[in-house]
Image (cartoon, grey):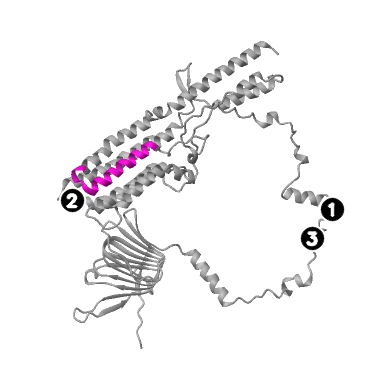
Amino acid sequence: MDENLITRLESAVTRLEALSARQVGAAEGGGDAAAMDPSIVAFDDLIYQYVNRVTSAAEKIGGQVLDVSKIIEEAFNVQKELLIKIKQTQFDNALFHPNSGQWKHISIRKLFSVLSVVLSHVLREGNMVADALASIGCSSTDLQKPDMAGLVDFLRPLNEVITKASALTEGRRSDFFHHLKTGADSLAALAWIAYTGKDCGMSMPTAHVEESWQMAEFYSNKILVEYRNKDANHVEWAKALKELYVPGLRDYVKSHYPLGPVWSSTGKTVAAAQVKAPTPAGPAPPPPPPASLFSSETAQPSSSRPKEGMAAVFQEINSGKPVTSGLRKVTADMKTKNRTDRTGVVSISEKESRAGSTSISKTGAPKLELQMGRKWVVENQIGRNDLVIDDCDAKQSVYVFGCKNSVLQIQGKVNNITVDKCTKMGVVFKDVVAACEIVNCNSVEVQCQGSAPTISIDNTGGCQLYLSKDSLEASITTAKSSEVNVLVPASETDGDWGEHALPQQYVHIYKDGQFVTTPVSHSGG
């Protein structure tokens, strides 16, 4: 064999050894390099500029407000450590390119694989260089994009801090409940780091931060209203906390992680990504070259491979063999009309069980909750006469959907009320700012105890509408509805109700160049 060729290959191996040693040094200093990354430095600035303002305002108040502020500070520090771990994986494989003076991401394993392929073709005798290559190796400490179990393990430190904040809101309600609730709910914004793609069930990171703060802003507004003219320190704390998330964290995520954290495409998974001390043993050997270059087995031609699916069916039909030879003969007792174990009569119990399972599958889980701090949702409540919404304000709306045989009381002024696809449902409310809408319902009763400027009834069969003295001037609009009765107070002394049926039939007469519409009136002869 040419001595010059062997000398050149040995020189290449020597260079790879130097690169491998340099990579080890880069991996050891990866934590410092990751900490100096612009995104990590920007997160430090976020903590210094915004988080410190929250803690400084909390120190003026003290007590539980200071406790929850310290937990918020701890949560941001934990997220910083998680970001450093993710960023560090991008430095583990960084090698310094001496010609360009820049760091480049080069996989040593790929270089070994390429060199192994070259050696396999030129070195058929002797194993001198192959042994040298086998003595060189590198280990990968990258973090892959995690699965669900790995992501839970990776985010466990952050989840523990959030749980600690939520524990402060439990138990007996304190005087600073709104402060504790605002701080605990706001930490949900830090979950943007769990975004792994459009199929993960989360909003985009920037949108997630905004939506999470909107949930916490409900209680933050209560602080501003309560302490506006009482204590400026509480107002300062609430405003500082809002600025921490909007625009602080929102703008940071938008600038550095608009699509979520960037994970390495190779290496270990998150669950197994634990930092361990290096062992004195030699590095692992390079991976074997592709099997297609060294495999002794010849590829089987496609024509000789056994066919599958419909190709196998047509092949058997075209073979000339009797294709029905393997079929069983159907005897008279196997025919459906002669079978005694089957009957066309369906029992009542079987019919009820089928109907019950169908109704359960179509009906979702019952809900009575406030969403996004703006909308009360009451869904799929059946047989409940104790539904109450008491903590509401004029900026919130109420949406009632799919309820049956239930009664809902709304104790306070709300912006809008919508009753949709309900049967035998009763709704009692005090005041509504915009309108009360009844849509696609059957046999419902709605009572207004205060004022309502507009009441709309659409595609509803059977509606009893009770109006108070303050709501007699309400504008009532009906469309595609029947059996609509409006009850108004008849007198102030006996408390009786006067019932008025709204017409559902109309007569249209063409008169003086236009149609004149009047309701149909029936009079007994």
Tag 1, which secondary structure?
A: loop
The residue where tag 1 is placed is 321
Q: On the rendered image, what quadrant is the C terminus found in?
A: bottom left
Residue 248 occupies which quadrant of the picture?
top left
Picture coordinates of residue 487 (x, y %)? Answer: 29, 76
Picture coordinates of residue 60 (x, y %)? Answer: 18, 43
The residue where tag 2 is placed is 227
Between tags 2 and 3, which lies in front? Answer: 2
Q: Residue at x 42, y 26 (%)?
A: 29
What is the number of the mark on residue 115?
none
Q: Main secondary structure of the magenta part?
A: helix
Q: Please report the bounds of the magenta region as a residue range.
A: 59-81
Is there any visible trace of residue 315 in the rendered image?
A: yes
Given residues 441 and 180, the one toward you in this image is 180
**Mark 3 nearby-residue class (10 Å; few <14, some 14–19, many ≥20):** few
Q: Is residue 440 left or right of residue 113?
A: left
